[in-house]
Image (tube, rainbow, N blue to C red):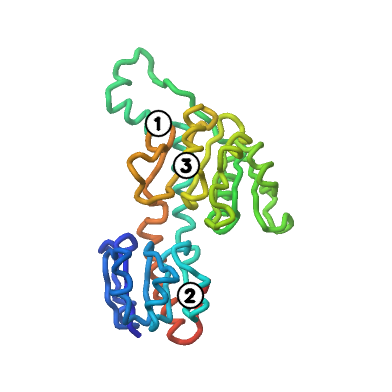
Amino acid sequence: MKIVILDCHAVNPGDLSWEPIKQLADCTIYERTRQEDVVERAKDADGILINKVNITEEVLQQLPKLKYIGELATGYNNIDIAAARARGVVVCNIPAYSTDSVAQHVFALLLNAATRVDHYAEAVRRGEWCKQQDFCYWDTPLIELAGKTLGIVGLGHIGQKVAQIAHAMGMDISAYTSKNSTDLPECIRKTTLEGLFSTSDVITLHCPLTAENAHMINAERLQKMRPGTILINTGRGGLIDEQAVADALESGHLKAYCADVMTDEPPRKDNPLLQQPNAYITPHVAWATREARERLMAIAVENIRKFIEGTPQNCV
């Protein structure tokens, strides 16, 4: 089997080994691939591994030998799944490899917004504490999370892990989910999307991006949120209308927007969120701990092994 890895750099910038995959297949590895080079590089491949390269119907039409696409991520909105199925191409993703890492990052963002660690650490570096007459120094309100309501949109692996951590911190938890109420832990109250928006102090998004939920957080829904809400997005940038969120931050209706994803990645310099001091945005790194990437690599190897054996797993 001939496999081409089209964009390996984000997953493995050199600190992990591709040897387990090389033992299974004839493997060609590219750190990055421009969209216009995808067909040329993959034209002789039986399988490709991708992270953010787009595999469209047009691309698939030009890859008649292709039998397998391995998505080196959980999300697969960069692949035309219907077109792949129509051509009998098996698509496998990497589920649940980064659950703990992403949930951890959610709370890194939330705790920073609530207690302003970045603000105070920078103030101390500037010498502001040294100037004070009192033993402590604070110039912006701090928030205790215990007793606050966390609204979770989507209760997959990550959403459930976030709920566990929030419960341990004493937060009340509501969720918008397709799961039955009887299947939820006692600490989680199922609610409608509108009910979640109107009752939550903190809202965190953990759903995949689809055509149906693109811009689910728009100007109308932002106005249904409580004044002072903290909104967190580690799902996909396209779940929100970025201009509407920037406007809500500007007006003070949103206290903070915390995100690890944006609609365009990397973002344009003129993205309105980048001008907002209460937008805390990290560069899509929540998934990227070494531990999570090691799990990703192990699952990717097993996905290929199972495909070769004729019993593919993690198919989408």
Amino acid identity at mark 1? Pro
* Callout 3 crowding tier (Cα within 10 Å): few <14, some 14–19, many ≥20: many
- Between 160 and 69, the residue placed more toward the observer is 69
Residue 242: numbered disc? 3
CA separation in Å, label 2 and label 3: 31 Å
CA separation in Å, label 1 and label 2: 43 Å
**Mark toward the start of the polypeptide (2 vs 3):** 2
Residue under pointer 2: 84
- Between 268 and 102, the residue placed more toward the observer is 268
Tell me: residue 83, above or below residue 270: below
* Callout 1 crowding tier (Cα within 10 Å): few <14, some 14–19, many ≥20: few
Quadrant assignment for the N terminus: bottom left
Is there CB contact under 8 Å for labels 1 and 3? no
Q: Nearer the viewer, mark 1 or mark 3?
A: 3
Q: Residue 147, can we see it?
A: no
Residue under pointer 1: 277
- Between 251 and 21, the residue placed more toward the observer is 251
Q: Position of residue 166 (x, y in %)?
A: 57, 44
Mark 1 lies on a secondary structure that is loop
Q: Position of residue 99 (x, y in %)?
A: 49, 57
